[in-house]
Image (tube, rainbow, N blue to C red):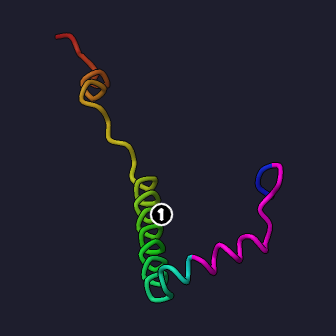
Amino acid sequence: MFGARGIGIPELLIILVIVVLIFGTSRLSGVGSALGSSIREFRKAVSEDEEKPPKPEAGAESESKEVTKP
């Protein structure tokens, strides 16, 4: 899966067990919920940014006005 030798499912499970033993399940659930809310806020901000129309520049506004001669 990863690299020439590869990290398979058994290796990933061993790493997961070691992480759970070090940090505990309560701390991991707190980190997971914080990570999930951060990703949710990021996606919300990106989608709100895409919905807003771009603001015209100050120089572009003066160029678009039609000049009439008397």
Report x, y in % for residue 68.
Answer: 23, 15
User: In the rendered image, which quarter is residue 1 located in?
Assistant: bottom right
User: In the rendered image, which quarter is residue 16 located in?
Assistant: bottom right
Answer left or right for 58 relative to 44.
left
Answer left or right for 60 relative to 15.
left
Residue 57 lies, with reference to residue 24, above or below; the image says above
Give, as a single range, the part of the protein colored magenta: 4-18
Q: Nearer the viewer, residue 50 or 16?
A: 16
Residue at image position (27%, 29%) is 61
Asked whether residue 56 is drawn in magenta, I would say: no
Residue receiving disc 1: 43
Quadrant occupied by the C terminus = top left
Residue 4 lies, with reference to residue 44, above or below; the image says above
Asked whether residue 7 is drawn in magenta, I would say: yes
Residue at image position (63%, 81%) is 17
- Look at the magenta stretch and give its main secondary structure: helix
Report x, y in % for residue 21.
Answer: 55, 83
Farthest residue toward the top?
69
Residue at image position (43%, 62%) is 42
Residue 36 lies, with reference to residue 42, above or below; the image says below
Answer left or right for 64 relative to 51.
left
Report x, y in % for residue 28.
Answer: 48, 81
Q: Amino acid at mark 1?
A: Arg
Report x, y in % for residue 65.
Answer: 27, 24
